[in-house]
Image (cartoon, rainbow, N blue to C red):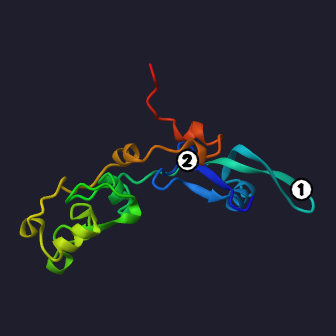
Amino acid sequence: MMDLQTLVLNADYRPLSYNPLSLWSWKDAFTALFLDRVTLVASYDVEARSPSRSLRVPSVVALKNYVALARSPAFTRYNIYLRDGFACQYCGLRLPSGGLTFDHVVPRSRGGLSSWENVVAACSPCNLRKANRTPDEAEMPLMNEPRRPTRYELHHRQPEFDHRQYHHTWLDYLYWDSELES
């Protein structure tokens, strides 16, 4: 029971975030329930007990007050990899996130910024080969020009959720905007 997590939905019953998925520990979910900050949507078939009470552990909660989401996604390593399709932008090699690095197109030592428009996913061999040069100087053209993605773009690049990884009570909320079969 110690590793149970609770899916957190916004007041409109959409997940607060997909990248990463918005999760709380079950203890934090209980605290929010007792403070009347969330509504219980679904529970696990597991009970937490105190000397005087026994309550089912929440698997899904929804915030009572709507939280406006930022228009653009956070500039994170994972979101860079997601934007670039988990592929090196120099050679096209697809790798898991642990096999990628990120590269400044214009090196920081030459005034390049750490921004959506100047950072790309790269495999280690390409990153080392490019070194402290621009792609033109290294004769390593980019597969895609780096740019700021939208939340929508990142959501639709998110790897398909593994049904086995999530509790069945979460699935209706993780697939709310999936295209329906005709």
The number of callouts visible is 2
In the picture, measured across the screen, residue 67 lies left or right of residue 96, that is right
Please tell me whether residue 10 is drawn above or below residue 177 in the rendered image.
below
Q: Earlier in the sequence, mark 1 or mark 2?
A: 2
Distance from disc 1 to disc 2, alpha carbons, whole Å, reads 28 Å
x then y, percent, for residue 78: 39, 60
At label 2, the amino acid type is Asn
> Residue 148, which numbered label?
none
x then y, percent, for residue 36: 71, 53
> Residue 10, which numbered label?
2
In the picture, measured across the screen, residue 134 lies left or right of residue 103, that is left
Frontmost residue, 117 versus 84 = 84
Residue at 49% from the left image edge and 51% from the top image edge = 17
How would you rate the neighbour count of disc 2 (Cα within 10 Å): few for under 14, some for 14-19, many for 20 or more? many
In the picture, measured across the screen, residue 45 lies left or right of residue 129, that is right
Occupied quadrant, residue 132 = bottom left
Please tell me whether residue 136 is drawn above or below residue 131 in the rendered image.
above
Frontmost residue, 175 versus 17 = 175
How would you rate the neighbour count of disc 1 (Cα within 10 Å): few for under 14, some for 14-19, many for 20 or more? few
x then y, percent, for residue 143: 18, 53
Occupied quadrant, residue 19 = bottom left
Frontmost residue, 93 versus 82 = 93
- Element under disc 2: loop
Residue at 26% from the left image edge and 66% from the top image edge = 115
At label 1, the amino acid type is Arg
Please tell me whether residue 160 is drawn above or below residue 47 in the rendered image.
above
Mark 1 — residue? 53
